[in-house]
Every structure is written in C-alpha cells, then in structure tokens.
C-alpha cells in the first residue's frame, strides 16, 4: 500500500554488496504513493508472495523496510541492494524505490505519516530526525541476531494490535509502539556509527539532540552554536551538509511539528500554545505558523477537525 503522508517499513536480509547504476528517466514509469487510512499501515509478509511492484514508486513518506529473510533486489534511487536476512532499510520521503521481478521476503511493511507520528511523545523526535533527515547516509543498517529478534517481537506486537477491531484510543496505542520501535532503531544506528562518524557528523547529531530537548525555549541558531562551541555560520553549514536543510529550517520544523500536534490533539487556546513555545505574543506565533504552513493556527485546527473520519 502507498500513501502521500506515511513512512513505510519492511524487514529484509542483510547483504554487504550494493551496485550503483543510473536508470534512464525515459524508460522508467514512476508512480506516486496513494493515501493510507488514518495515515498508518503495517502488514506481515510471509515470503510466499512477490513484493509490491516492479514499477518504480516515489515515496510520499519516510519508510523503514525490515527483512527477516528474503531474496531478490530492492532499488532505492540509483542504488540496487540484494535482499537477504537481517536488513533494515531507512528510506526518506521523496526517494524512488522498486523491487526486482522475483523478489520475496519474510518480514513487515510499516508505514506512517507526519500526522500519525505527531501522536508520539516529543521525546522520540530526535530519533526520527537522526534516522530520516538524511536517510541516504543510513540507507541500510546491518542487524545482529539479537537486534533482529527484538525488532521481530516489537513489529509483531504492533501488527497484532493494528489488526484488532477499532477501539477508543487505538491510534494512540499504535503510536506508543511506534515510539519504542523508533528508539530501538535509533540505538542500533548510534551503535553502528560509533567510531566511524566524522567530527562534523558527531556535532550534527549533538545538535539534533539539543534541538529535541530545547526547541521550546531556544529558537535561534546562535543558541545551539554556543552550546556546541562553534559559530552560528559553522552550524548552518554543518546542518546543510549533513541533512540538506539549514539549522534554522530544522529549528522551525521542530516548532511547527509541536504546534501542529498541540492544535490537532488538544483544545488549548492558541495563545496558550504560543506562550508554551516561547513566542512573545500570540500574533507573533500566528505570523510564524502561517508563514510556514500557509494557514493560520485556528484555520489549521478547524481544517484538521473537519477532515477527521469517524472510526
């Protein structure tokens, strides 16, 4: 299944080899993902059916692909990966993927969008930022037997909860499982990176950690640069190089994500949200929000409420 606002996760086997090649735009038809109900989806793959499609798809979401065991190939942009046991793929929104014609696997597909992710506590935001702000750096993570066993257990628990009949707060329960999985994957990624990251990458990771902890009180690049012991210009260049986004853009993105969560899932007045996020006045907050979303906070909240489908 595909959706314009979800992250998709699959589990495959690990293989160290990867072959780069350039594919001709004129010979490949690229389709966009379709929307998912409730902005979330997980499925179990038992290896008896072929993968989704050999047609290339541009993801509308961030996606994880976890392969317990499998065979065939998965192409991500211009890189072709052989599927095997113990692989975890991290694929960012906007990347193009396709499977080889005889590809099969045992594992899980997990997809979720931004509005679903916002149900997760903000304490997990830095995990998502580290994994997906520059997913091409972490495209394929090799997993130990212990890591695979833990992820199979967690993903199976999430899948079993997902296929139950709807009940009150079911989406919140699914989001809690998702937070645990994201933290686990971030820990795996961090352990693999130790000793291999450049000093700049270590600084960037530290910046993301500081941002996740302090974004409500610190809105300026200079605040974080001072804590890191570097200049604001250095931090801006570092962020752009590591993530493709400027430091200010990441700070604003964190603020907007928290503002959207508060507008969507609480009935607190806009002025209260503004002060919680350390804006001087509600007008300043409203101007900031509209500049970054093209909608006022109240209009955004109204539109979200009107678009909620009854369960």
Image: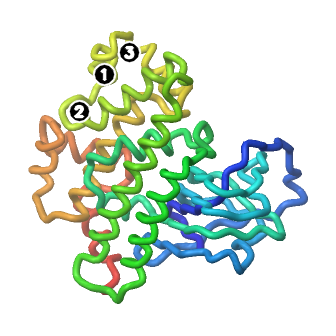
Image coordinates of residue 15 in percent, x first then y, are: 72, 48
Q: In the depicted view, which residue is nearer to us: 231 or 291?
A: 231
How many other residues sit within 10 Å of disc 1, few (<14), some (14-19) or many (≥20)? many
How many other residues sit within 10 Å of disc 3, few (<14), some (14-19) or many (≥20)? some
Residue 24 sits above or below residue 278 on the image = below
Q: In the depicted view, which residue is nearer to us: 239 or 197?
A: 197
First in residue order: circle 1 vs circle 3: 1
How far, Cα to Cα, is label 2 from label 3? 16 Å
Find disc 2 in the rendering and name its residue: 214
Residue 168 sits above or below residue 18 on the image = below
First in residue order: circle 2 vs circle 1: 2
How many other residues sit within 10 Å of disc 2, few (<14), some (14-19) or many (≥20)? some
How far, Cα to Cα, is label 2 from label 1? 9 Å
Give the residue at x 56% y 25%.
241
Q: In the depicted view, which residue is nearer to us: 115 or 14?
A: 14
Image coordinates of residue 268 in percent, x first then y, are: 11, 60
Color theme of the render = rainbow
Please tell me whether mark 3 sits on a helix, a strand or a loop. helix
Q: In the depicted view, which residue is nearer to us: 13 or 93?
A: 13
Give the residue at x 49% y 72%.
42
The C terminus, quarter of image: bottom left
First in residue order: circle 2 vs circle 3: 2
Image coordinates of residue 194 in percent, x first then y, are: 49, 27
Q: Is residue 98 left or right of residue 114?
A: right
How far, Cα to Cα, is label 1 from label 3? 8 Å
Find disc 3 in the rendering and name its residue: 232
The N terminus, quarter of image: bottom right
Find disc 1 in the rendering and name its residue: 224
Contact (Cβ within 8 Å) of mark 2 with mark 1: yes
């Amino acid at each position: 299944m595909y959706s314009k606002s979800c992250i998709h996760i699959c589990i495959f086997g690990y293989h160290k080899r990867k072959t780069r090649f350039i594919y001709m735009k004129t010979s490949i038809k690229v389709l966009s993902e379709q929307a998912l109900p409730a902005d979330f989806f997980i499925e179990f793959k038992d290896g008896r059916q072929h993968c989704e499609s050999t047609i290339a798809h541009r993801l509308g979401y961030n996606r994880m692909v976890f392969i317990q065991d499998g065979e065939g190939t998965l192409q991500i942009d211009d890189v072709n990966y052989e599927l095997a046991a113990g692989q975890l793929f991290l694929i960012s929104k906007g990347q193009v993927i396709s499977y080889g014609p005889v590809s099969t696997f045992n594992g899980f597909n997990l997809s979720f969008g931004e509005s679903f992710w916002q149900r997760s506590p903000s304490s997990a935001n830095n995990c998502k930022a580290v994994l997906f702000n520059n997913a091409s750096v972490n495209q394929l993570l090799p997993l130990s037997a212990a890591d695979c066993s833990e992820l199979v257990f967690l993903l199976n628990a999430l899948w079993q909860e997902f296929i139950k009949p709807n009940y009150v707060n079911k989406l919140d329960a699914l989001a809690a499982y998702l937070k645990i999985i994201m933290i686990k994957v971030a820990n795996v990624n961090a352990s693999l990176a130790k000793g291999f990251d450049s000093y700049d990458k270590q600084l960037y990771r530290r910046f993301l950690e500081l941002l996740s902890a302090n974004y409500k009180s610190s809105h300026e690049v200079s605040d974080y640069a001072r804590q890191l012991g570097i200049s604001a210009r250095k931090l801006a260049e570092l962020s752009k190089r590591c993530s493709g986004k400027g430091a200010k853009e990441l700070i604003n993105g964190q603020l907007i994500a928290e503002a959207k969560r508060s507008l969507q899932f609480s009935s607190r007045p806009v002025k209260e949200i503004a002060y919680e996020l350390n804006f001087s006045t509600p007008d300043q907050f409203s101007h900031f929000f509209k500049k970054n979303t093209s909608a006022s906070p109240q209009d955004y909240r109204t539109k979200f409420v009107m678009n909620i489908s009854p369960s």
